[in-house]
Image (tube, rainbow, N blue to C red):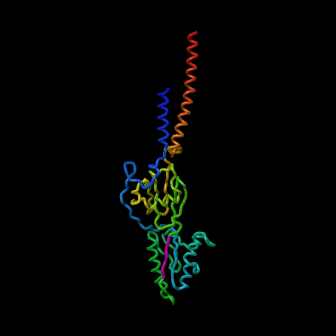
Amino acid sequence: MIKLKNILFFALVGLALSSCVTARKVNYMQKPDNQIPSYADTLSYEDYVLRIGDRLYVYVYSLNEDIQKMYNAGGANSSQMRQQMSGGGMYGSYDLYTYLVDEEGNIDFPTIGKVAVQGKTTREVKLKLEQELGTLLKEIPGYSMVSVEVNIVNRSFSVIGAQSGRYMINKEKMTIFEALAMAGDLGEFNSRKEIKLVREKNGVTTIKTFDARSEDIINSEYYYIEPNDIIYIRQIPGYSFGINHVTTVIGVTAATISFGVLIYTIVQTGINHVNKNINGDYKK
């Protein structure tokens, strides 16, 4: 009985410890080793190039009030337009102040007409519009130089598997850690070891898999996310139930052992009782 108890004890302790969610499994910025991969220094952030379906916020600055009113919703300043675009004003509609990149890769801009923007960065579109407007408006009495602000609006990324949802990209460059923080981090039972990133670029969809625990991630191609990225987080296999504190491990182990010993005692008592009856009948 003692031997069986020992086997039961060590088996249960091993099971409990194997269910433990350790810091090794959930901490970020760990040194690469034989379990945590090292990523090559491939960081080279590239400006986002416009695609069909993107929406551009365009604001024209000028000292000439007539020009200001012509292009900027009756003269509203940039902050007012941004507030109304975000829903803080009476309209709350992107359509009023933004330009859609159509199926041909163009936007339809007032007084200029079709402007090809697909495959260009916002900086390139800004320079192009300033050039076009400068040529068009220089004959207007009282003309002054114009400056154009161009931004992409409604940029987002999606997370599935943990805190699933669609989240807005609210800055020019967003890192994978900022994206995960917006989604509420990963929780104890979600894998940081095999995060999948689904990205479409130049009409080609690729799936990249990386380990977010490695500190080398900050110098890799996985560090910055792009608009329309999909981040897939899977649950750690076998961790639908887990134990994450030593005291919990001890408590669960002790309770399980006690229950096992009780069952063993009941079964053994029954066996002894049956053997006793059999031996008694045999003697008779």
Quadrant of the image occupied by residue 210: bottom left
> 121 and 10: which one is in front?
10
Q: Is residue 96 left or right of residue 46?
A: right
Residue 25 lies, with reference to residue 171, above or below; the image says above
Quadrant containing the C terminus in the rendered view: top right
Q: Is residue 19 above or below residue 229?
A: above
Q: Position of residue 109 (x, y in %)?
A: 52, 76
Q: Residue furthest left?
A: 40
The one nearer the camera, 140 or 157, is 157
Q: Depth check: give the residue in front, 100 or 3.
A: 3
Please provide the residue range marked out in magenta: 146-151
* Main secondary structure along the magenta-highlighted residues: strand
Point out residue 54 in the picture as x, y percentages from the top left corner: 51, 67
Q: How many numbered marks does the figure carry? A: 0
Nearer the observer, 157 or 212: 212
Residue 170 x %, y %: 51, 66
Q: In which quarter of the image is residue 127?
A: bottom left
